[in-house]
Amino acid sequence: MSRMNILVNPGGLKMFRNIIKELKEHAPFTFFGALTGIIFMFLFKNMSQSNAENLFYIFHPLHVLLSALATAGMYKQYKCSQDRKQCNIFYLLIIGFIGAIGVATLSDSIMPYLGEVLLKMPHAEVHAGIIEKPLLISAMAIIGITIAYYNPTTKFPHYGHVLLSTWASLFHIIMAGGQNISFLLYAVIFLFLFIAVWLPCCISDIVFPLLFVKDSKHEHK
């Protein structure tokens, strides 16, 4: 949806306002998630790269599962309530799969990597689950979509995967470490964690699925 369409279309303007409202409402929770990430980073600052990678591949797949559940659940609630004949499992699968894996990769891997490069961390590298462990990540997304099809809930999966995304991003950054971290660097990493989780997670769970639903008025259930 273009900016011009949002300005001239009352439905688009309403969706735009809802998006801004959601971003504001989720900012405090994301702040809390990023804060827990910094605490974990301080506690695990001497963790080896291999252990950080193992933890990344625990939190990242779980993030994909909950993101798929929230994204597909949002679409299922509103699309099926509008027209049950259009409640097609194929569309649900595509929207849930792209929304979960695409945005989870962005928030857990690509954005942390950009932060690592800017901070000149010695082992900066993109660890994309869908490339390194495609079967695991795809299976987690499909499980989340399947659960959403039979029980489309969004509130718990959304808040849960905000935390999981924060922790996955954190261990991605720890993998790139290898240096003493100053208090200033902690502050910069906190900012990266907040942005890396806040925008992508809200976009995947709320904005992306509602682009395929007309006249939506959304509320987490």
Image: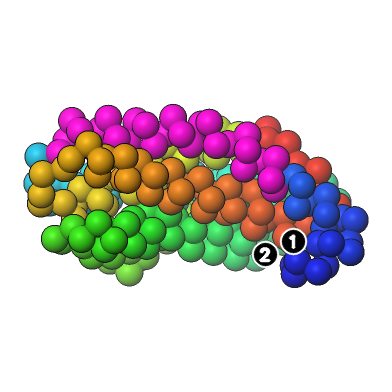
The residue carrying mark 2 is 91
Of residues 215 and 65, the one nearer the viewer is 215
Residue 201 image point, x, y percent = 52, 48
Range of residues picked out in magenta: 19-45
Looking at the figure, which quarter contains the N terminus?
bottom right
Q: Does residue 136 appear to the left or right of 52 in the view shown?
A: right
Magenta span: chief secondary structure: helix
Q: Does residue 111 appear to the left or right of 126 in the view shown?
A: right
Q: Are marks 1 and 2 in contact (CB under 8 Å)?
A: yes
Magenta run includes residue 23: yes
Of residues 188 and 97, the one nearer the viewer is 188
Quadrant of res 113: bottom left
Residue 156 image point, x, y percent = 55, 32
Q: Does residue 60 appear to the left or right of 205 in the view shown?
A: left
Query: Compared to 107, does 46 lie above or below?
Result: above
Q: Earlier in the sequence, mark 1 or mark 2?
A: 2
The residue positioned 29% from the left and 35% from the top of the image is 38
The residue tagged with tag 2: helix, strand or loop?
A: helix
The residue carrying mark 1 is 212
Quadrant of res 130: bottom left
Residue 94 image point, x, y percent = 60, 65
